[in-house]
Amino acid sequence: MAKLELERAEGTARPRPPVKWAGGKRWLLPCLAPLWADHGRRRLVEPFCGGLAVALGLAPKRALLNDVNPHLMNFLTWLRTGLDIDLEMANDRSLYYAHRARFNELVAQGLSHDREAAALFYYLNRTGYNGLCRFNKSGQFNVPFGRYTAINYTTDFSAYRAILAEWDFACGDFEDVHMVDDDFVYA
């Protein structure tokens, strides 16, 4: 079983973002951390949470994380449970297209919120071209196979369970995210 890689920062071990995500803000953490330092008691709100780079980097006790992508939010919801993936994962073109077809089948059947869909989403994200997440007009995931020499897949996400325990997830338009006056908002 592939275990989660941890980043070492300021003497603490934090999990890396679990998925590759366009527009990831991990590179901004050295600028954001000093701003967050005096507000750690507040709830972090991210209307566009993406791959969780900011939330994992700042490590708030409480957070409200939103994204409009229901497949990403399904994966993150399962991640909070300590997702354990038993799906075959390999950097293989044929396997990729078979898993993509299965994912699209689940979506078409209205089963896109189950554990299998979350596991497939993770695999497609890690193996697809540049970590893109793209759907056609029919709602089918259509990212082509990526061109990687090697991919480190994680199958055991139990390290996320404790970190994400007090975090809330929402899926919708950023204008509908319920914020309160004391929230620390990163958008």
Image: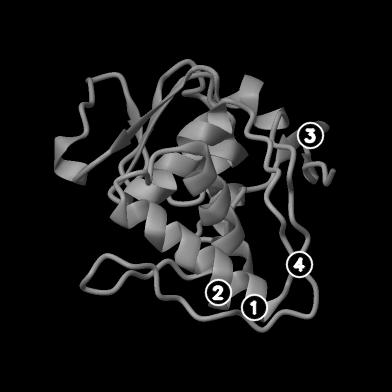
Q: Residue at x 52, y 33 (%)?
A: 78
Tag 3 residue: 13
Tag 2 residue: 97
Cα gap from disc 3 to disc 4, whole angstroms? 22 Å
Tag 1 residue: 94
> Around disc 3, counting alpha carbons within 10 Å, would you say few (fewer than 14), some (14 to 19), or many (20 or more)?
few
Q: Nearer the viewer, residue 20 or 25?
A: 20
Q: Secondary structure at mark 2?
A: helix
Where 186 falls versus 146 (above or below)? Answer: above
Cα gap from disc 2 to disc 3, whole angstroms? 35 Å
Q: Nearer the viewer, mark 2 or mark 4?
A: 2
- Amino acid carrying label 1: it is Ser
**Looking at the image, do the residues carrying marks 2 and 1 touch, with CB atoms under 8 Å apart?**
yes
Question: Quadrant location of residue 146?
Answer: bottom right
- Amino acid carrying label 3: it is Ala
Tag 4 residue: 151
